[in-house]
Structure formats: structure tokens, C-alpha cells
Amino acid sequence: MAVLRQNEEFDADSLKKKVIGIASDMIMHDSGFHEHKTKAQLLYAPSGCMTVTTSDRQFVLPPFRMLWIPAHEIHRVNFRNMVAYRSIYFDAAYAEKFIRSSLKVLHVNPLLKEIVERICFWEWAVPENDQENLLKVFWDEISKAPKEKLELRMPKDRRFKKVVEDWTQRLSMPPMLKDLAKETGAVEKTISRIFKKETGLSYQEWRQQWRLQRSIELLVEGNSIGEVSHRLEFSSDSAFIEFFKKHTASTPLQYLMKQE
């Protein structure tokens, strides 16, 4: 077990065990872009909300979602408020026996939540055969965990890559299409064509998906519906609720209750 302090460094690749769990309560964390060369990683927070950015995607992880990160996947983990950080590292060759090596977001049911807590707090010195029964249940639950799609593909075109990164880091609202055209010097049709090609969404759709991800972060961090509606520039609280329900099939309150 490793209980990390704020800003304490940890190198999973330097440890040879096939399963390594760590836990920490952190605030205002930015891991920077990095990769694990010999370890796959399961990233989860039972409270708080994390944002994970890879070379081409952004994921938001509220407390009922976890992210599987294969070895060699370059990624960055950010959160701004207090997060109960949980991470399990698996020897890549061992993990590949149970799970296909690709990025995926998985739903966390109550049993899986408790298993992850056990693994993150068990002693590394415990003989591995004493942990096998729990790991068997873990892999069985992982194989049945529903995949969830709450990701945002990022454009690669140099004209938009930098401004998108700036919005993400500063938490600035992406501008309307006409304003982005003025900012970048590209015509609106060109912007829409490039976003559709590189992200699968028109710019307007991409902007809405950005708002959805950010709204989930803000809600999990404890902001009221009114505060979220104002910060994300909705015309009214009811307009935000309708937007949220359209994209998640639940109201903000119902969505937050999934964490319990």
C-alpha cells in the first residue's frame, strides 16, 4: 500500500509487483503528460472529479466512473478541488490476460468500488496468493462493467489545437463559431469541416460536449445548478437542466445521485 502525500512522486514502473494500489487525498493536482512503460493503470476517485487528457481525447471521471489506461498511453490527470484519488497499476503482460489493452471508461457499481478500495489499501508485503481470490472477483466485475461514453476528441489541426488546449487549461468557455473564426482567421465552413473530420462532431456539437463535461465537473465539485448555468452561459437554469437531460437522460440531481 502507498498513501501518497500532496506532490509526492511515485514511479510505478520501478516496482516489479504485478498489482500495486495507491491512495491519496489531493487538491489542485496536475500530473503533467506522462506514460507508464510497463504498467497498465486503473484510475478512479470515490469522491471528487478528475479530468484525464490523452494525445487526442479528454475524459471526465465523476465518482461512478473509472478509466482503464493501457501501458504506453501518454496522459495527464487534472483536478482542482479535493479528490479521493485511487490508482491501481497492473503489470502490462498480466493485465492483458483479462482486459483488452485500450482506453475505456467503465461504470463503477458498489461491489467494484469496494474491491478497488481493498486493493488500494492492501499491504504490498502480503503474499500474492492471499490476494488471488479478490483479484478473481475484480476481473470478473471489470469484464461485466458497462462501458460509458463521456469523452471529447480533440482537434489535431495546428490552428485549433493550441486554442483548445488553452480553453481546457484555463477552463474558458469555447467561443461561438463566428468568434472562433475571428480569433483564428479561418472561415466558419473550414472550422466546421476540420472539427467534423478530426473529432467526429461539428464545432457546435463539440462545444456542447465540452459544456457537458464541464457541467459534470462543476456539479460534482458542489456547485449549484444556478452557478453551473451561469458559468456555462445558459440562458436560464431550466435551459441548462433540459440540455443536461438531453445528453445524459437524467436531470443534474438524478445524475449526482448515481454516486451514492
Image (cartoon, rainbow, N blue to C red):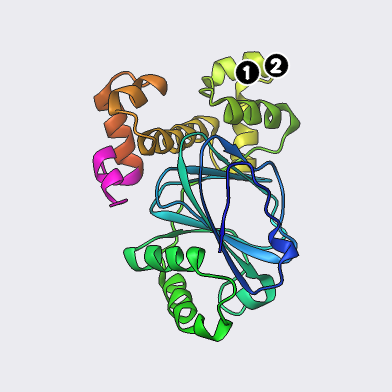
127, above or below 165, in the image: below
Using the image as rendered, state which of residue 236 and residue 182 is in the foreground: 236
Which amino acid, mark 2? Gly
Badge 2 marks a residue whose secondary structure is loop
Q: Is residue 253 magenta?
A: yes
Q: Quadrant of the N terminus?
A: bottom right
Badge 1 marks a residue whose secondary structure is helix
Location of residue 94 by image quarter? bottom right
Which amino acid, mark 1? Ala
On the picture, is 249 further left or further right than 37? left
Using the image as rendered, state which of residue 211 and residue 42 is in the foreground: 42
Location of residue 70 by image quarter? bottom right
183, above or below 71, in the image: above
On the picture, is 10 further left or further right than 48? right
226, above or below 80, in the image: above
10 Å neighbourhood of mark 2: few (<14), some, or many (≥20)? few
Residue drawn at x 29%, y 23% is 226
Percent x, y of residue 250: 27, 44
10 Å neighbourhood of mark 1: few (<14), some, or many (≥20)? some
Could you give the CA–CA distance between mark 2 and mark 1, rounded to whole angstroms? 5 Å
Magenta residues span 248-260
Q: Is residue 158 magenta?
A: no
Q: Are marks 2 and 1 in contact (CB under 8 Å)?
A: yes
Percent x, y of residue 202: 54, 35
| Residue to which mark 2 is pinned | 185
Residue drawn at x 75%, y 62% is 37
Location of residue 15 by image quarter? bottom right
Percent x, y of residue 53: 61, 44
| Residue to which mark 1 is pinned | 181
Using the image as rendered, state which of residue 172 and residue 128 is in the foreground: 128
